[in-house]
Amino acid sequence: MPELANPRAERVKAVRALAGRSVRQRTGRFLVEGPQSVREAVRFAAGQVRDVYLTEAAAQRYDEIVRDAQAAGLPVRLGTPEVLEAMSADAQGVVAVLERRPTTLDELFRGAPRLVAVLANVRDPGNAGTVIRAADAAGADAVVLAGESVDPLNPKAVRSTAGSLFHLPVVAGVALAPTLERLRAEGLLVLAADGSGEHDLDDLQDAAAGGAPAGVPDLRTPTAWLFGNEAWGLLPTDRELADAAVRVPIRGRAESLNLATAATVCLYASSRAQR
Amino acid sequence: MPELANPRAERVKAVRALAGRSVRQRTGRFLVEGPQSVREAVRFAAGQVRDVYLTEAAAQRYDEIVRDAQAAGLPVRLGTPEVLEAMSADAQGVVAVLERRPTTLDELFRGAPRLVAVLANVRDPGNAGTVIRAADAAGADAVVLAGESVDPLNPKAVRSTAGSLFHLPVVAGVALAPTLERLRAEGLLVLAADGSGEHDLDDLQDAAAGGAPAGVPDLRTPTAWLFGNEAWGLLPTDRELADAAVRVPIRGRAESLNLATAATVCLYASSRAQR
């Protein structure tokens, strides 16, 4: 019999309430939904995991999650499908509650990062999460959500990272200007991704490959990419904080790429040049 | 006074009903929502536009849409905010009704395409639309939605293209195997994007830049990229229809990129090699 059978129990409501930002801030906890994200949380952030909840069917299907959690000494609790559904509508029978453990810029720099993505005022949780996932895939060392950016522990943001939230340091809630100053002080080139940037990414890639137009930023240098809001891009005052602004070439008639696809192209160009 | 003031009028209901696939198929029309998409429809597909609807505020704010529509002899109708809201909840006061004019593979090949994106069984309209937008930005010549892929005239798909639906030919409702056969017969290399592909995209890019590991597909060749479903990727039987399978390198711990970001990296790699 599952331990948890009452979808209206206080414990269940407390898990569901973590969807709200104010509850996350008050309790210092957040919600991780779905087998992919929970698997990565248990593997890479076991020290933050307070509880893992599964339906019996999910515990069988994703038995590696149960094994990894038990091996890490984490409490694994079975609930009825109604209980899991009450905790989250997007969990496919698997939920975990984690403690927030904010990463500081100091911690980030201890790793001597060579590729960092900085989001300025990115508001949509799905976009922020997708950029974190793409940054992980491209081999970036960290992601920073600056200015008025969304909370990366928002459930939709967490889901969109597909587990990457637990793979690399994600710093949130910092002001943009001092963050960029610090990045520069640590030796990183700061490049703003901007549709009307003065440099074409193709030229930077050509230069990095040795076919070089002179006078363009060197992609092989440790780099922080600055990405702006999904709707209005970078404010001019924010763009000016960068060392240079770079546009992804638009070869067709599209006005622009969306945030996540543009960020992916820039980050992959850097990680390829830095190989 | 706006011409249309009754949100319950038959005309208004008929516009809203185009959100449904069966209505689109019965009427041969579809809905375009929002200033960006309507602007591009009026500019690039005026022959398909039946009606443009705006609120008075939107007609002032987006006066270039009204000007372009009138210059093309298209009917522009003003409606109250309630009428536009009843037509679409996502229109920011601007809606157009267009006639479907399906593009055939024959028409596509008349343009001698050098870069084509083929989606196999992509189900999510937002993903399909984002790939169409990225394909346009990368300079692809066409997009083909094959197999059980979503209808690209689904309103969410149209919105996600941000107008790119009207910039390049989009072929839908075709079977995958004969489409790939045809692409190959027309001289295109067919590359499957697949996380476990036998080739690394980096190697193809190195080869195209002349730094060449031998024996990898030539990215400078006219190419059709095959992308699979957002959740389960390409079925093995579909992957086998390609000339080769190529993986986007994952440099971090992410399991994969999402569909749209992976497609963007592949298409940009091709268009860069084909410069």
Image (spheres, coloured by chain):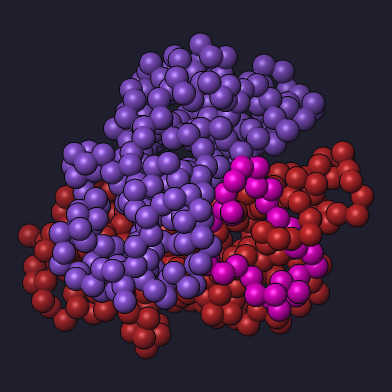
Chain colours: A red, B purple
Residue A216: horizontal and vertical position, in percent? 86, 54
Query: Does residue A263 show up?
Result: yes
Residue A213: horizontal and vertical position, in percent? 89, 46
Q: Residue at x 51, y 45 (%)?
A: B44
Q: Is residue A3 above or below residue A265?
A: below
Which of the two residues, A2 or B138, is positioned nearer the viewer here? Answer: B138
Q: Residue at x 26, y 79 (%)?
A: A17
The quadrant of the picture occupied by the N terminus of chain B is: bottom left
From the viewer's perspective, tell me whether residue B31 is left or right of residue A191.
Answer: left
Number of numbered discs: 0
From the viewer's perspective, tell me whether residue B135 is left or right of residue B175.
Answer: right
Q: Which residues are magenta?
A: A230-258
Query: Does residue B190 show up?
Result: no
Q: Quadrant of residue B134?
A: top right
Q: Residue at x 26, y 68 (%)?
A: B4
Which of the two residues, A238 or A42, is positioned nearer the viewer here? Answer: A238
Q: Quadrant of residue B148?
A: top left
Q: Is residue B23 above or below residue B61?
A: above
Q: Is residue B26 above or below residue A22?
A: above
Is A239 included in the stretch rendered in magenta? yes
Residue A91: horizontal and vertical position, in percent? 26, 59
Residue B267: horizontal and vertical position, in percent? 58, 37
The quadrant of the picture occupied by the C terminus of chain B is: top right
Q: Is residue B41 above or below residue A158?
A: above
Q: Residue at x 51, y 21 (%)?
A: B109
Is B253 included in the stretch rendered in magenta? no
Which of the two residues, A229 or B213, is positioned nearer the viewer here? Answer: A229
